[in-house]
Amino acid sequence: MLKKPQNKTVGSLRRGRFPAWIAFVAFRYVRKKDGRSTASPVLPVLGIAVGVLALTVIIAVMNGFQLGFIETILEVSSYHIRIDSFPAGRLDALERIRQVEGVSAVMPFREVKGLLKRSVEGRAGRPILIVMRALPVNALSLDAGMASKIEIEQGSFNLSGENTLMLGAEAAARLAARTGDRLEFISIANMLPAVNALTDGEPDDSGPDFVIAGVFNTGFYEYDAGWAFVNIDAAAKYADPAYFTVGIKLKNRWNLDEPLERVNGIIAEAGLSGGSNIRVSTWRDYNKAFFGALRTEKLMMFALVGLIFIVVALNIFQGQRRIVLEKKDEIGLLRSVGASELDIRCVFLFNGIMLGLAGAIAGMIPALLIATHIKQFFALIETLVNFILNVLSFITGADGGYFSVFSPAVFYIKEIPSRIIPREAALIFLFGFLSAAVAAWAASKKIASIKPAEVMQYE
């Protein structure tokens, strides 16, 4: 008895977890160009590459600026945990806090505000508003994080004398002062009777003289223009000497719960919490509005630059729809030999994945190179632009000027920071290739309307 021959092609299309022919056909559609095809893979790949490149570099530079500001604020000013109105006589509790696991530094300080002015040849200069942070003499050795953020431009960080003062670079420029100059400080506390009564002092409009021991720069304009550091004992005459503020640094600022619980426990065990004005706050509470604004800014930048991926996805969607119509006969042939609708859709999905991966890789590699060499990249741009300006200046005879991407006259920065966060780079990469895959899958829905019998009767 003769056996009915089996269609091996149909069997091969239906067997297997992931038939190899799907990848083969998808690669053929990407590679092969014929007279009828109008969908080119070059533009989608180029669009994804440009989107990944632009978003990665922009976010890296934004991270550099934002994290630089955040770390300067936390290291110099607000600390990770702050204890307000801490009794100056309870140094035993302070030592216990230093022993808490996860704590890297504990800094007692006082803070007063007032006017600082410099007299030149017997004439009083124009005063400026200053925040005077009073620290221990060994402040930099107590807090390595703070020491890393303070750059000494003149003199040295010396708070050994009660009348020595460290002044911000911008404040020194506004006062036309330098190391060795004497400054006069008028405390706002001395002008307020209520505060003056706490300090058991008399109002003194003239105030003591301070000698500038050094000029510092943090890279944060607010501190450089309106801050000064003095000896902690020098501020006791302007505020209640029985209390000071304690700043606590953590080894990991994101791990707040356990150290905060231990600090609150020590305060309670020392009997400082009941009936006292003592208050414990964290960096998230103290800088909530500022950090929230930075987070919103980054999200908006993600959304705006991410519009590139939407445009590219629409381009891929239209391109895949054209391919579906142009390959209608081939799709009908595949359906007739046993390929299911899902198989055909997987062909176009695989096509989109290849385009997305090619574009994401092509954009991510140069993006990482640029982000890790951002100084050289902007220096190259400035060199090219200035060369063009010089050529135009030579031709026209006009002064071409000098171009700078981040001019010091406009931006308060010395260098362009850049910081790549791995999870954000991975997210951008996924956005790049998934936008192509989703667009290709959506475009392949058109396949459901193709009937194999209708196609084959005209072939």
Image (cartoon, grey):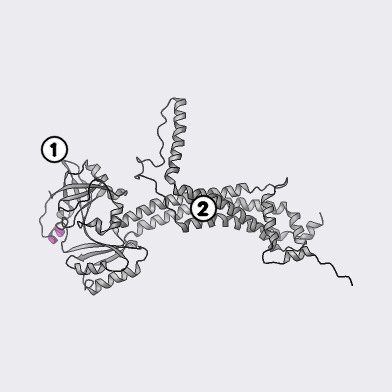
Q: Secondary structure at mark 2?
A: helix
Within 10 Å of disc 2 (Cα), the crowding (few <14, some 14-19, many 20+) is: some
Residue type, label 2: Gly
Which is nearer the eye, 34 or 190? 34
Q: Which residue is mark 1?
A: 121
Which quarter of the image is occupied by the N terminus?
Answer: bottom right
Expressed as whole percent of the image width and height from the top left, the position of residue 448 reads: 70, 61
Residue tagged by mark 2?
Answer: 306
Tell me, yes or no, whether the highlighted magenta stretch contains residue 417: no
Question: Badge 1: how crowded within 10 Å, few (<14), some, or many (20+)?
Answer: few
Q: Earlier in the sequence, mark 2 or mark 1?
A: 1
Q: Is residue 199 magenta?
A: yes
Range of magenta residues: 193-203
Point out residue 413 in the picture as x, y percentages from the top left corner.
Answer: 35, 45
Where does the image place residue 160, in percent across and percent down from the top left?
17, 53
Circle number at residue 89: none
Say what amino acid the circle numbered 1 marks.
Glu
